[in-house]
Amino acid sequence: MNSALPTSVLRTAEPFSQREFRDALGQFATGVTIITARSAEGHAVGTTVSSFNALSLAPSLVLWSLGLKANSLPVFRHSVHYAVHVLSAAQKPLAELFARRGADRFSHTSYQDSAHGVPLLEGCAAVFECRNLRQHEEGDHLLFIGEVERCTHHADRAPLLYHSGHMHTRGLI
């Protein structure tokens, strides 16, 4: 049987390491987001996340994921509302702050509370205020599906990008 596919495509895939998988995923450039919520005790919580996608236009749904070992997971798991902040290139220091373990993330961060008490960060390229619609545990992450109740954007703010394990404030070329 003749195939139009090259032999290299037809071969069984060789095993790969977790590092190789991570490096291959790193070739997909993404935006950088910070997800915020409030704990049941009223504490502001936030974390830097690059795994964010649009899921549906009608209804308006977004998808993001958080590692099962993340310290903030219990808060996000039980929050009724959260906000997804698409960061602007000028917010790289903020992304780095919210990515550090044990950092005091809100003491020097400008924000205001949403109608649901969720911290809304200032200066973002876009913000999606969401109801925590569904969650699905898969592998080593928990997937969150958020129903967008309100969104804002600023087209004049260049996005912060994540590629090959680094944040970029300008294009990747």
Image (cartoon, helix red, strand yellow):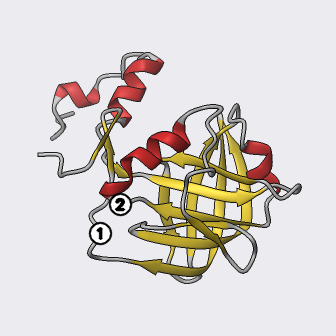
Type of amino acid under label 1: Arg
Label 2, residues with CA under 10 Å away: few <14, some 14-19, many ≥20: many
Q: Nearer the viewer, residue 109 or 73?
A: 109
Q: What residue appears at the point 19 percent right and 51 percent down from the top-left corner?
A: 170
Residue at the spot of label 2: 88
Q: Which quadrant of the figure has residue 123? A: bottom left
Q: What residue appears at the point 17 percent right and 46 percent down from the top-left corner?
A: 172
As helix, strand or loop, the secondary structure at mark 2 comes to: loop
Residue 20: percent from left, percent from top: 37, 21
Residue 116: percent from left, percent from top: 75, 75
Q: Is residue 92 above or below residue 113?
A: above
Q: Which mark is residue 157?
A: 1
Q: Is residue 139 above or below residue 151?
A: above
Q: Quadrant of the N terminus?
A: top left
Q: Nearer the viewer, residue 150 or 104?
A: 104
Q: What residue appears at the point 42 percent right and 19 percent down from the top-left corner?
A: 19
Mark 1 and 2 residues: CB-CB less than 8 Å, in contact?
yes
Label 1, residues with CA under 10 Å away: few <14, some 14-19, many ≥20: some
Q: Which mark is residue 109?
A: none
Q: Which quadrant of the figure has residue 150? A: bottom right
Residue 118: percent from left, percent from top: 70, 67
Q: Is residue 10 left or right of residue 67?
A: left
Q: Nearer the viewer, residue 52 or 55?
A: 52
Q: What residue appears at the point 33 percent right and 31 percent down from the top-left corner?
A: 24
Real-space Cα separation, disc 1 to disc 2, in angstroms: 6 Å
